[in-house]
């Protein structure tokens, strides 16, 4: 696992319906929003190849995989939003 996430991971990842949003930050943390609730969760993460491991501040741990541009994490599929620039 690396503490410096690859640039391809950094950014906003969302479910198809837009309800769950994970903003992966370059400092190894991410902010999760649910529906209208911004910052519902704050977690840290590390990436190893296509595997991602996440921990919340209570040490709950969850893993996921990047497969064909889709993040499969906690039973969800998240898609990276395009950079607006």
Image (cartoon, helix red, strand yellow):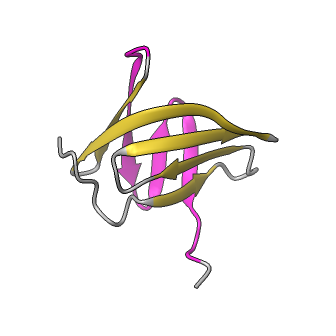
- 85 sits left or right of 68 in the view: right
- Prevailing secondary structure of the magenta residues: strand
The residue at the point 35 percent across, 38 percent down is 45
Q: Position of residue 26 (x, y in %)?
A: 36, 57
- 2 sits left or right of 10 in the view: left
On screen, residue 84 above or below 34: below
Q: Is residue 59 magenta?
A: yes
Q: Position of residue 56 (x, y in %)?
A: 44, 24
The residue at the point 23 percent across, 53 percent down is 4
Q: Position of residue 80 (x, y in %)?
A: 53, 61
- 49 sits left or right of 16 in the view: left
For residue 64, which quarter of the picture?
top left
For residue 20, which quarter of the picture?
top right
The residue at the point 47 percent across, 43 percent down is 30
- 24 sits left or right of 50 in the view: right
Region rendered in magenta: 58-83
For residue 5, which quarter of the picture?
bottom left
The residue at the point 76 percent across, 50 percent down is 17
Q: Quadrant of the N terminus?
A: top left
């Amino acid at each position: 696992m690396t503490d410096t996430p690859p640039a391809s991971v950094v950014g906003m990842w969302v479910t198809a319906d837009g309800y769950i949003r994970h903003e992966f930050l370059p400092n190894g943390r991410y902010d999760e929003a649910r529906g209208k609730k911004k910052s519902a969760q704050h977690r840290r993460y590390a990436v190893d190849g296509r595997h991602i491991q996440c921990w919340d501040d209570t040490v709950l741990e969850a893993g996921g995989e990047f497969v064909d541009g889709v993040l499969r994490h906690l039973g969800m599929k998240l898609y990276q939003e395009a950079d607006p620039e």
